[in-house]
Every structure is written in C-alpha cells, then in structure tokens.
Amino acid sequence: MHDVVRDFALNIAPKYNHQFMVKAGIGLREWTNIDTFEDFTCISLMSNNTIELPNELECPKLQVLMVQGSAKICFPGNFFQGMKNLNVLNLSGFRLFSLLDSVSFLSNLRTLYISDGELGDIGVIGKLSKLEILCLSESNIKEIPISFSQLSNLRLLDLNDCWELTLKSRGVIFSLKKLEELYINRFWEWESESEILKSNANLVELQALSRLTHLEISISNLDLSPKLLVFPNNLSKFKLRIGYIEYSNHFDEYLDGSRYSRYMCASQTNISKIHDCCWVKGLLKRTECLILKKIANLESISHNLVEDGFNELKYLDITLCDEIKYLLNAMEGTPNSTFHNLEELNIYCNPNLVELCHGQPPALSFSKLKVLKVTSCSNMLSVVPSHLLQSLQNFQTFKTYGCRSVVYIFDCKDIKIAEGETKLLSSLEHLELKELPELSHIWKGDHQSISLHNLKEVKIWSCSKLIKLFSPTLLQSLICLEEIDIAYCNNLEEIFEKKEALDEELDHIITSPSLGNLTSMYIENCHKLKNLFTPSIVKCLGKLKRLEL
C-alpha cells in the first residue's frame, strides 16, 4: 500500500509544479548523475547506508529532504547551504556528533526530525527561528542548550525516550510561548521553586504555555511540584507519571496514545501528597487511564482521591496498595457519577482488599465495565457480590488468579429478574479462574437469573474445592461456548451437572442448541471427574474437533 501511494504521488506531482526524486531503500552507493537539482521540491534518500554526497547541492526549490535510516552517510560541510527554502528535514538514525554549521542556512526550516540518533552539540538548532516541529526522541542528548529559547515559533517539542537527558536549562520552556505539544517522558530532574542553583527547568515554566494541548512529563517527587500549577483548558491530551516506575510491557500497553488520551500513573508516593497538589487532582478528574502502584494510606479510591467522582475514567489499575480495603465505599456517601464510564479494571496484589464495592453502588456505576481482572488479593471472600453483579450490564471478560480466600465468584442470591429484563452475565464471553484453593462455587444462589448465551471460553485451573461447574439451567444457555480448559481441579465431579428431569424438561435439553459451537475441550488431572457428557449432550457436539484428557 505504501508503494501504491508513493507511485500515485510521483505521478500527479508534476501537475502541481512539484518534482520528486525518490531513491529510498535501493542500496544506493553513488550520488545520482542528474545534471541539475534546481527544480526538485522533494528528495527522499532514506535507508541507503553508504551514499557519497556532493560537497554542495543547489536546490533552491527543495522543500522536503528525507534521509532517515541512512546512518553511514557523511554530510560535507556546505551540503545544506543551497537549500534555503527547505521546510522539512529528517535526519533520524544518524550519528551527528556536531550538527553542521550549514544547517543554520536553513532559515525557512519548519520541521526537523533527528530521532534515534547519536548527537553531540546541537546548539545550532537554536538559530532556526522559524522551526515549528522539533523531534529529538530516542536520542542520546544529555542536555537542552539555552539557545533553544530562541525557537519562539516552536509548536511541538518531542524529547521522549531520551534516557540520558539530565539537564534542561531553566527558562527555555518558559520562552516557548507558542508550544502546543511537549513530550519529555524520561526527564525527572525538575527543580523546585526554592532551589538555590536554579540550573534545571522548573515545572512552573509550564504555566507560560497557554496554547498547550498535549503534554507528557514525569515527576520523581511531588514535593518538587508547585501546589497551584494551572494548565490551560485546551489541554486535551496528557500523560503524567508521578514517582519512579519500573517500565514493563504491562504499563507500556496502556501508554499507547491510540488507546487513551489522558493518562496518569502514580507510584511509590503518599495519598496526602496527591491531595496537596491541586493541579494533580484537577488532572485526575479528567484522567481516562489511571495506574496506582504502592500508594501509601490509600484505603478507598472514591473517598481518598476524587470526592466528586471519576467521570471520565475508562481504565483503572491498582497494584501493591497494601492499605486499600475498598475500591468504592458506597457507605461513605459517594457521588452519583462514580465509575460510570469505567471499562477495564485490573486489581493486583492488594492484600487487605475486602470488597470491590462496599454497599450498594450509585446508579450507572460499573455499567460500562467490560474487563475485570483480580489477582493475588488474599482477603476477598467473594469477587462479585450481588449488589455489584446487577450493575455489570456490559461485562465481557473476567479473570481471577491467586486469591486464596475466595469462596465464590458471582453471588446471585436474592436477585430476581423480571420478565423481559436482561439476565445477569448475558454479555460475558471469557471466564478464567486459576489458583483459587477455597473456591467452592462459581455462581452462588438461583441460576434462573443468569444467562451465559455469549460465553465463548472457560479456563479453570487449580480450584481444588470446586465440585460442579454448570447446572442444567446454565447448560441450556451455553449456545456460543467454543472452548473449555480445566486442569488440576482435584475434587471436580461434574462439568455439566446431571439432574433428574421431567420428560418435557429432558426433551428441552435434548433439542437445545447448547454446546453446539463447542470445538475444543481439554481436561487434565481432574481425578474425581465422573463423566464428561450425557448422551443427550453428545448429540449436540457436531463441531467438536479437539477432546484431550
């Protein structure tokens, strides 16, 4: 598809008075012998490692020069001198231990990419007064020179993943008044307002950026942060990291900008410090993705963090918060809008967590929740009590691992579903339970209120007290089930519970389409299992392809 678009652009360019030269990725070693380059508006030489360039190149109409991915190319000292109308220059992936002085001749340059490069002195960039986009991401730069304060037209500055960056000259950010997007995710050394040396950048400088719409920063300690920092109302996207965070695939998955627009991750700090920073609390109200790890004195999300609710939160991850007892404590008078947009909830290794929701949740709370994962929370007896279960109207994926005290998962006791109303768990598609040694029931109470007609996958491992899985009532709703994987359930006797039935009930079971989509069944080390299927069930297994015991 890329080639098709490129060829199309090359074909139509002359109609609009553009002439392109594209020699990308063809192993070019020698400079082309074209007589003149005066009419070219775009040249692409990217991914050609060893081209020998001419000392000078007269390209008065050239607007775009792309040479990224050609790391072994050497630029002669006057190479850029004849490109005074150049707008876009991409030098990504180069070893440029000092930028050429001839770069300063690019007085009309608007966009400069030098990402993933080995750079030395980059002070000459400060002379490019018309520059609007500057990308130095993934480079080895150690400091931002004071000359960058002259880039008064800069709209985007990308310093993400510059792991060696330790110095940002104070006043540079303050000078970039037109900045709309700022990305500095690996710089932690912000100075407080009281620092005597005043050599590094201060967070207060961000307040001068009234046009800011995108911001990505990291703060090692909230003590260094001004309490009353105010961000503009047009800040539509942000990624804020508080406290040092061990980077892993688990967290990076949610840093993907295409998934969430407003992200916050806080680690190894105290809940009181978050309370004291009004600007952090202000951003917290607008956060879509929130990750909390090792937060001291956090007992309840709704009570301790945002008193007027999480109106925009879509993803929540709580990890290693030893003092948290409830995710939502409805007994303390929670706001009506708490968690009404939450789509994914991940709870990991919180040893004192007793309940996800203590008391009846407010209307619409958890109504959009699709994914729930609970891991290694040793104090929980039930994961989804009855008062919470009725709120899960869009529930699709449920996973619980290593919760050693859990006795049952879904409490259906005393729940009555009126005729015509949607039954509980009717949207559930994936169910995974592992290492739950005290689990005796998955669904507790009357199964008449449950329908599993969208359930596709069931995985149950190491649940040694589980005896029965699906009742006859639940069996009738398993019309989409495709895969069953059960292992190390030492006391499991029946997967599909047998029951004495009246003839009409038996006929219904025989003609029911339940298990008609089952394709795979894997059973391992379930030594007390009496049977797999009744004769009536076997008649429905037309799609079964894999049966492994």
Image: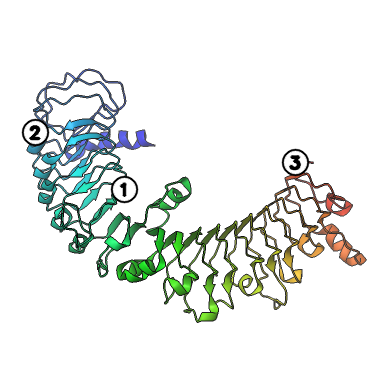
Q: Residues within 10 Å of mark 2 (few under 14, many from 20)?
A: some
The label shown at residue 545 is 3
Which amino acid, by three-letter code, is at mark 2? Asp
Quadrant where the image shows the N terminus? top left
Q: Is residue 58 above or below residue 319?
A: above
Please tell me how many numbered marks the rendered image carries.
3
Mark 1 and mark 2: span between their CA atoms?
Answer: 29 Å
Can you identify the residue that label 1 sits on? 186
Horizontally, residue 214 falls left or right of residue 122, namely: right
Which amino acid, by three-letter code, is at mark 3? Lys
Quadrant where the image shows the C terminus? top right
Mark 3 and mark 2: span between their CA atoms?
Answer: 69 Å
- Looking at the picture, how far across and down is residue 369, in whole percent? 54, 65
Q: Is residue 502 or residue 146 the one in the foreground? A: 146
Chosen colour scheme: rainbow
Q: Residues within 10 Å of mark 1 (few under 14, many from 20)?
A: many
The residue located at (31%, 48%) in the rendering is: 186
Badge 1 or badge 2: first in the primary sequence? 2
- Looking at the picture, how far across and down is residue 293, in whole percent? 46, 58
